[in-house]
Image: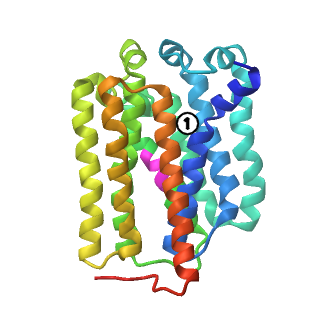
Amino acid sequence: MSAGREILAIARPHILGVAIAAAVTFGWLLTGRYLLWLAPVVAADWFFVNLLNRVTDVAEDARNGIVGTALVARHARLFLAAAFLAPLASFLITTPIAPALTVPRLGVMLLGLGYSYRIVPTLRGLRRIKEIYAAKNLGSALIFVLTGFAYPLAVATRIEPATTLAVLVLFFVPFEVTFEILYDLRDLEGDRAERVPTFPVVHGATGARRLIDALLVLSAIVIAVGLFTSSIGVREALMVAAPVVQYVFYRPRFARGITARDCIVATHVATAELVLFLVGTAAWSAAGLPSDIRL
């Protein structure tokens, strides 16, 4: 693989893409605006989180055969500098024009640092979020909540009711964690060797599969409850398709073993679903059809 393709893989564009799509989609649902200008901000912050993780996880990634690991190992200082440069440069732009973004962005930075470095105090001393059972997955989900929900809300002039926000977040978190577990299934051997207490390491692949299924069902239930309590409308309820698609996608691949490509494709599928939702609802509104149908 060429150095250019390796660098692209190291940047994890599939993660950047889904994070941007989530921020624009949920931003529109909660504020009524297409906040496209947030895209480079979200990309810069997730670039920081991803690259920091690549630099500090060289041993584990090498065991799992992750593309670009050798390149990261050879130029660790350069990649580390790039990780910090992207968000710091964007802070110079966003702080004067959108100061309300500063606090949630600092939250993402702190979580990214805690995920990769031993700065989290525990009863066993300082540890990484990644080394704490369950916190690894929830920490990553929280970063998505910040970039996908807190960033748009920080710059909003109009905000949907708190009940709508609650339903969307409670739907999103368990759904997002299913991706985290899929990636952990991909990294099972390396995580086991490095003693990272992921769900697949602690409970085995079958236990992880059962947890994914339960989380997908939970996401669908949240949408159903939100719809029938009028906390969300039919438009938002269309998102129930996401856990269904996830189940159909991952189950046959789980049977033969989750691969790195499976994880990337699953992430691209989620991005495509968000983009389709944006395009479809925009076309619906442009046709003059009612956009907020509630039971």
Q: Range of the magenta residues?
A: 141-145
Q: Is residue 10 left or right of residue 108?
A: right
Q: Which residue is drawn at 62% across and 66% down?
A: 100
Q: Residue at x 59, y 54 (%)?
A: 20
- Identify the main secondary structure in magenta: helix
The image shows residue 97, relative to residue 59, as above or below, that is: below
Residue 264 appears anywhere in the view: yes
Residue 115 horizontal/vertical position (percent): 49, 34
Residue 226 horizontal/vertical position (percent): 29, 71
The image shows residue 244, relative to residue 265, as above or below, that is: below
Quadrant in the rendering for residue 48: top right
Residue 135 appears anywhere in the view: no
Residue 94 is one of the magenta-drawn residues:
no
Disc 1 marks which amino acid? Leu
Q: Residue at x 43, y 16 (%)?
A: 190
Which colour assignment does the render follow? Answer: rainbow
Q: Which residue is drawn at 32% across and 33% down?
A: 252
User: Which residue position is annotated with label 1?
Assistant: 113
The image shows residue 170, relative to residue 126, as above or below, that is: below
The image shows residue 93, relative to residue 193, as above or below, that is: below
Element type where label 1 sits in the image? helix
Location of the C terminus by quadrant is bottom left
Quadrant in the rendering for residue 122: top left
Residue 143 is one of the magenta-drawn residues:
yes
